[in-house]
Amino acid sequence: MLRYALVGCGRISGIHLDAVARHYKENKIKLVALCDIMEEKALLAKESYISKTNETEVNCYTSMDEMLDKEELDVIAVCTPSGMHPEHGIKAAKKGIHVLTEKPMGCDLEEVDNLIKACEENNVKLFVVKQNRLNPTCSALIEAVDANRFGNIYMVQSNVYWYRGQNYYNSDDWRGTWKLDGGAFMNQAVHYADLVQRVGGNIKNVSAFIDHLGRKIEAEDTGSAIIRFENGAIGNMNVTMLTSIGDYEGSLTVIGEKGFVKLGGLGLNKILEWKFDEEMPIDKDITNLSYHTTSVYGFGHVGVYANLIDSIDNGASFLVDGYEGRKSVELVLAIYESAKENKVVTLS
Ligand SMILES: NC(=O)c1ccc[n+]([C@@H]2O[C@H](COP(=O)([O-])OP(=O)(O)OC[C@H]3O[C@@H](n4cnc5c(N)ncnc54)[C@H](O)[C@@H]3O)[C@@H](O)[C@H]2O)c1
């Protein structure tokens, strides 16, 4: 059993621990320690984990350094505020511990690169959470892209029309700050940035506008970006957290020479259109992959952990490694640079 710890026992940690509890029941992974600077959060997370597993031997810490000194760990999940992921991942890597970092990998490309480097130098694996790739709807789309069913891809378009009130941003100091969070693109829509580049391919340049039109935050609550892919395709992303009727749409449209697919719903949970010139057996019942969701997080964390366990135990290939996770950070930072400096930005 892999000896596992989690740092940052906030909102998303429960989804991680639910997934770990599922794999614990198959004797694959075992939570041994939790860390949060707010002790009560670590204790609450422990209680909730015990209620699912009856496993009581979980130590709680308020200092990550102390946890790393005292515990023998194989793997750690980093669920602290986004801008802290590189620092916390590097600490673990230097102790020879495999790292699973929440999205985004960080808010600064140099720090993200340092994390990748630290994991390589210390011979540990670096996994990045991009659970939306595992939505059955998204997996089917990615398979269609990889099988070249679209032929040339002409346009990739994504909308994220959700709602986050001022209370959400006020709930924690780090939210909406450039250093630790970023805005709607870096926090909520980074999954969509990931998928845009996964289906459209490498990005050549971007041009964008962003602003905070309705919330008092440093970063953006709304923005629009135009994207040019290396293969010539054109794309765009429209993102806002000001949708007054609530979380309304998380969609992705791919228009190709030989195919047209639109995923939509609240968070890519519905196949709204699926048409290819050359039909395949999978197409007949494709809309059965649509599912109901009330959570924009989706249900992919269980699969993320299945891949992590399989990769550490058996050498299975990564769902999303550091280099793949870096791409959406690079795209969002290019969007920010374009908007701030009012210029077209070329990706390196
Ligand atoms: N995959 C997804 O869909 C998804 C969804 C939500 C959040 N996230 C990501 O997860 C991360 C956390 O988000 P959240 O909403 O859970 O935030 P949160 O504020 O609820 O939780 C962060 C926790 O980290 C703790 N913390 C801060 N500094 C620390 C330190 N130095 N050492 C230990 N603990 C520390 C805080 O006390 C807090 O409990 C963010 O990067 C976010 O983007 C991902």
Image (cartoon, rainbow, N blue to C red):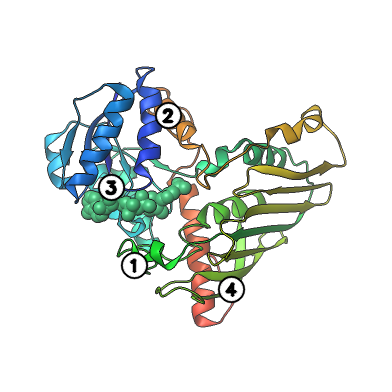
Which residue matches tag 1? 179
Q: Which is more N-terminal, label 2 or label 1?
A: 1
Numbered disc 2: secondary structure: helix
- Real-space Cα separation, disc 1 to disc 3, in angstroms: 17 Å
Q: Residue at x 17, y 46 (%)?
A: 39
Which residue matches tag 2? 311
- Real-space Cα separation, disc 4 to disc 1, in angstroms: 20 Å
- Amino acid type at circle 3 is Gly
- Amino acid type at circle 4 is Ala
Report x, y in % for residue 91: 23, 48
Which residue matches tag 3? 8
**Disc 4 to disc 1: CB gap under 8 Å:** no
Q: Which is more N-terminal, label 3 or label 1?
A: 3
Q: Which is more N-terminal, label 2 or label 3?
A: 3
Q: Residue furthest right?
A: 277
Numbered disc 1: secondary structure: loop
Report x, y in % for residue 242: 54, 67
- Amino acid type at circle 2 is Ser
Disc on res. 208:
4
Disc on res. 10:
none
Which of pointers 4 and 2 indicates the residue nearer the eye? 4
